[in-house]
Image (cartoon, grey):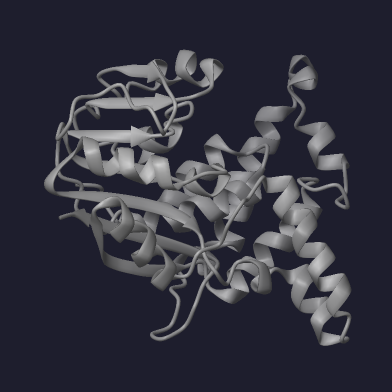
Amino acid sequence: MPNPDRDYLTLLLDRYWFAPPVALWRAVELRTVAEEDFPRPMLDLGCGDGLIAQVLFADETPIEAGFDPWLAQVRQAPASGAYARVQQALGDAMPYPDATFGCVFSNSVLEHIPDLAPVLAEVARVLRPGGRFIATVPSDAFRRLLAGYRERVEVADFDGAEAYARAVDARLEHHRYPSPAEWGEMLAEAGMRLARARYYIPAEVEVLWDRANATYGIHEHGQPLYRWLASPRLRKFGYQPFIRRWVVNQLGAHWRRAYELDVPPGGVGGGLVVVGEKL
């Protein structure tokens, strides 16, 4: 069971010091999803380099299996120590027998997959009856909570707001933003039921995150200085550990309140934890 009281903000600022806004979003994400129960054996769908699983499941035995379509990620993930085995595979053709896992976990992956129905069908196939599917995704409120979107809407520049959101979609390679009700329908088609959908990333935190993407040079309209200073090509000059410590100490304090904020009851946020159960 993950620990919701772990300081994910400090842990992820240390690991993602070169892209602090990524650390902020992921930290709130992990603090939220850590409250869920993850029955074993577990599969990590789109495991990447294993960093997220390494942080989230730090106190547990290695996850039974993880897979990713990208070979470079598959080569890196075993070094995290988070998995018993890692394979290269596609989400619509998982190399596992039926009813193998008690839980399938997917962290910020599904929004990048163009055709999701075959993937959800595979999730249901490899889950045991009663098994849980736990996914974090951007929510149906994600686009309208962006700072750039809200600023344009406030001056009635609706075309500009939509153009800004489309640019973010393209940069992040997001294909969809289903509502909780739409998630319920998609899971039902795959043979699962929606047990819970919980919003995270409150509106003010997404505004902070979106503006920080510009400050730290994450998107094309941002300031490039920080991204240049954090470039791996400049590691040989020896100053980057000082930047890393500054990020952990200063942003860890400055962003603490944002990290600890929850979406108010009945409100929406930029992220969504989707919990499904196999029927």
Q: Where in the figure is residue 132, as x and y percent of width and height?
A: 21, 50
Query: Relative to 210, is 190 above or below?
Result: above
Residue drawn at the location 76% of the way across and 14% of the way down: 236
Residue sitting farthest toward the left: 129
Residue 36 relative to residue 149: left or right: left
Residue 222 relative to residue 41: left or right: right
Whether residue 139 is visible, yes or no, is yes
Of 70 and 241, which appears nearest the observer? Answer: 70
Whether residue 36 is visible, yes or no, is no
Residue drawn at the location 48% of the way across and 55% of the way down: 137
Q: Where in the figure is residue 103, as x and y percent of width and height?
A: 21, 43
Residue sitting farthest toward the front: 189
Query: Relative to 115, is 263 above or below?
Result: below
What quarter of the picture does the C terminus occupy?
bottom left
Residue 70 relative to residue 21: left or right: left
Q: Quadrant of residue 176?
A: bottom right
Residue drawn at the location 81% of the way across and 33% of the way down: 229
Of 271 and 206, which appears nearest the observer? Answer: 271
Residue drawn at the location 89% of the way across and 80% of the way down: 157
Q: In which quarter of the image is residue 260?
A: bottom left
Q: In which quarter of the image is residue 85?
A: top left
Of 244 and 220, which appears nearest the observer? Answer: 220
Q: Where in the figure is residue 133, as x and y percent of width and height?
A: 27, 49
Q: Where in the figure is residue 30, as x and y percent of width and height?
A: 40, 52
Residue 192 relative to residue 52: left or right: left
User: Number of callouts in the render?
Assistant: 0
